[in-house]
Amino acid sequence: MGLQRGLLYENMYDMTLFELINTIENYNKGLAYELWKHAVLIGRVFSDKFPKTPEEASPELYPPKKRYKMPDFLIEKAKKRGII
């Protein structure tokens, strides 16, 4: 079981039981995410919504971009000019 997941017996003997269980659970969660992501991308191939950038393909892996609130005086100017 351990060798199928890329673990060596020497490393497994040095782990506590809690660490070993945690390692195997995290490996399984990572494998499940990878399979899910492949299925989503394969599904998008057959639709017209295929992502053009890695950020569009996996938004959960990238932090949200910083957004700044526009000052009130600029909002008022834009409203007066009819931009907003």
Image: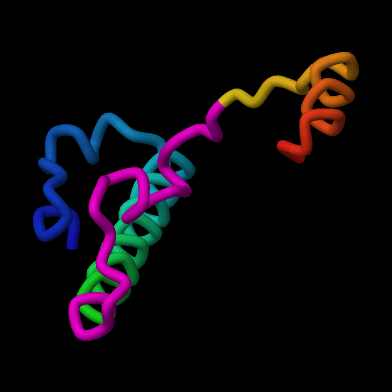
Which residue occupies 33% across, 34% down?
Answer: 15
- Tell me where residue 43 appears, x and y as whole percent: 27, 81
* The N terminus - image quarter: bottom left
Which residue occupies 40% across, 36% down?
Answer: 16
Q: Residue furthest front?
A: 81
- Tell me where residue 22 appears, x and y as whole percent: 44, 47
Please provide the residue range marked out in magenta.
44-65
- Tell me where residue 7 appears, x and y as whole percent: 15, 44
Question: For this view, does 20 lie left or right of residue 64?
Answer: left
Q: Image quadrant of residue 64?
A: top right
Q: Image quadrant of residue 10?
A: top left
Residue 35 included in the magenta stretch of the image? no
Which residue occupies 28% across, 59% down?
Answer: 51
* The C terminus - image quarter: top right
Pick the residue in front: 51 or 24.
Answer: 51
Question: For this view, does 67 lie left or right of residue 46?
Answer: right
Q: How is the image coloured?
A: rainbow
Pick the residue in front: 67 or 12.
Answer: 67
Pick the residue in front: 64 or 79.
Answer: 79
Which residue occupies 32% across, 55% down?
Answer: 57
Question: Is 50 above or below relative to 3?
Answer: below
- Tell me where residue 83 appears, x and y as whole percent: 71, 37
Pick the residue in front: 56 or 19.
Answer: 56
Question: Is 55 above or below relative to 77?
Answer: below
Residue 58 included in the magenta stretch of the image? yes
